[in-house]
Amino acid sequence: MSKIVIIDTGCANVSSVRFAIERLGYDVTISRDPAVVLDADKLFLPGVGTAGEAMKNLEERDLIALVQQVKQPLLGICLGMQLLGNSSQEGKSDVSCLGHVPASTSLMETGDLPLPHMGWNTVTPVDNHPLFKDIPENSYFYFVHSYAMPEGEFTIGRCDYGHAFSAAVQSGNYYGVQFHPERSSKAGAQLIKNFLEM
């Protein structure tokens, strides 16, 4: 059986991610113990709040160096995805992030559409990426965010809200989704299952 670990970032949606994984029939551990994290088969990095607060939390919990050592697949969720980038414009000055995805997060350009981008929107997978296996075309996922990563060679799923942005990314063993799969009904459950079985 796979060892599945949610990295204990101290953020509010850790429990909902755990319940979503358990509903699929998997055992999951929430931990920030380096031995437990580095021994996992699959890792989740959830995040809510602002990039500055989240990076401060990671620093206080000695998690920045730990995440840098990870060799197994890791899935960042919502702010957790943004933290995988180089930096975030969220705050009074740019916040340095983990630097695994070669992109920076900036305030969304949405035209006349309100921020935050909140609610259900469709995601278009890029190149039939296995993270989106068996998820019907034009499936809806649940978003809550005002900042986003641009599209680039790391984009594996895109979404449009005024302008196109990266809804899912991959760089080596680091994956990220801007939406909340744990709140995204059947499509979200399938995506979590795909990540666990990849």
Image (cartoon, rainbow, N blue to C red):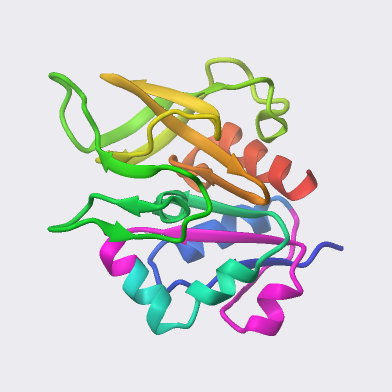
Please state the horizontal and vertical placement of residue 47, each as a whole percent of the image: 41, 59
The answer to if 52 sits in the magenta stretch is: yes
In the rendered image, the quadrant that contains the N terminus is bottom right
Please state the horizontal and vertical placement of residue 158, each as a whole percent of the image: 47, 25
- The count of marks equals 0
Could you say which quadrant of the image residue 127 lies in? top right
Relative to 73, residue 29 above or below: below
Q: Of 59 and 96, which appears nearest the observer?
A: 96
In the rendered image, the quadrant that contains the C terminus is top right
The residue drawn where x is 68% and y is 28% is 129
The residue drawn where x is 49% and y is 24% is 123
Please state the horizontal and vertical placement of residue 86, each as a whole percent of the image: 41, 52
Q: Residue furthest top?
A: 137
Q: Is residue 107 visible?
A: yes
Please state the horizontal and vertical placement of residue 74, each as a whole percent of the image: 63, 56
Instruction: Decide if residue 37 is on the left or right side of residue 158.
Output: right
The magenta segment is 25-54
Could you say which quadrant of the image residue 161 lies in? top left
The residue drawn where x is 24% and y is 33% is 108
Q: Of 58 and 98, which appears nearest the observer?
A: 98
Q: Residue furthest right?
A: 1
The answer to if 24 sits in the magenta stretch is: no
Instruction: Decide if residue 121 is on the left or right side of residue 171.
Output: left
Relative to 51, residue 67 above or below: below
Q: Of 173 and 116, which appears nearest the observer?
A: 173
Could you say which quadrant of the image residue 68 lies in? bottom right
Q: Is residue 145 visible?
A: no
Instruction: Decide if residue 3 is on the left or right side of residue 151.
Output: right
